[in-house]
Image (tube, helix red, strand yellow):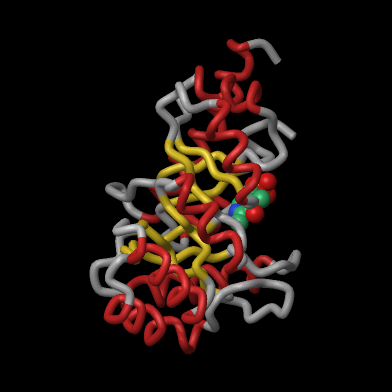
Amino acid sequence: MNKEEYKLYIDNVIRRVEFARVRFDQKHIVKIVAISKYSTTDEIKALYQIGQRAFGENKVQDLKTKSSILEELPLEWHFVGNLQKNKINNLLDINPYLFQALDSLELAYELQKKLQSRSMTLDVLLQINSAKEASKHGVMPEDAVDVYKQILQECPNIHLKGVMSIGAHTNDKAVIKKSFETTYGIYKQLEGATICSMGMSGDFEMAIECGSNMVRLGSIMFNK
Ligand SMILES: *Cc1c(COP(=O)(O)O)cnc(C)c1O
């Protein structure tokens, strides 16, 4: 695709987001984070040139490499992957706009220690394992509200902004929808939370209709 064709293609993705958000609420606003984990820095630049500013990676090393190659561009970098304890310092060196995948109280305590020693803060989402899948990271739905409150109280350098979840891994639309509803239900109970990040290329419209206000779109944004 040339630039004009790509622009029309992305306009259509945005239109789909628009139709879905209006079905939820006229005043609902949804942010698109382009997940660039399968894409090159040239492809990120092409998407930047037609207006996209928020990008996300799921490996600390890839985030570091791509964000430093593109450091001249005014981009907002999100980290959406699982964070191993021994990579916390590497992530903090990059200082991303938002860490979306805090998945346990234990990791929160480690992160708090490192943040405190650097006198820095980080905006973070608590990841919810909304369909309780063994293959996925995240806090169990029944524990989520308590864990969220505990982090708020005990980890002052972690600025919790809301929740993130990956839709259930199945072709059964009712089950996927239920996993989004579970996450949204938790989000609504959290005082001060402003971000409900759910929905990927295959299920973003349903996620938005369930209340998501941040979608993480990889393959569809890069036409893969
Ligand atoms: C890869 C990834 C995405 C995007 O997936 P697509 O299906 O390509 O849209 C979203 N969220 C997370 C956490 C991911 O790892």
Residue furthest left in the image: 192
Q: Residue, x 66% and y 32% (percent of image)?
A: 222
Q: Quadrant of residue 85?
A: bottom right
Q: Is residue 93 above or below residue 206?
A: above
In which quadrant of the rendered image does the C terminus lie? top right
In which quadrant of the rendered image does the N terminus lie? top right
Q: Is residue 75 above or below residue 8?
A: below
Instruction: Please state the horizontal and vertical placement of residue 50, each as a whole percent of the image.
Output: 50, 19
Q: In terms of depth relative to the viewer, which is nearer, 87 or 101? A: 87
Q: Residue, x 51% and y 23% (percent of image)?
A: 48
Q: In terms of depth relative to the viewer, which is nearer, 72 or 46? A: 72
Q: Is residue 196 above or below residue 145?
A: above
Is residue 203 visible in the rendered image? The answer is no
190 left or right, relative to 94:
left
Is residue 92 visible in the rendered image? The answer is yes
Instruction: Please state the horizontal and vertical placement of residue 74, each as a whole percent of the image.
Output: 40, 27
Q: In terms of depth relative to the viewer, which is nearer, 27 or 31? A: 31
Q: Quadrant of residue 177?
A: bottom right
Q: Residue, x 60% and y 34% (percent of image)?
A: 66
Q: Count numbered badges in the picture.
A: 0
84 left or right, relative to 120:
right
Q: Is residue 41 above or below residue 61?
A: above
Instruction: Please state the horizontal and vertical placement of residue 106, each as a whole percent of the image.
Output: 50, 81
Q: In terms of depth relative to the viewer, which is nearer, 161 or 28? A: 161
Instruction: Please state the horizontal and vertical placement of residue 42, each as a whole percent of the image.
Output: 65, 21
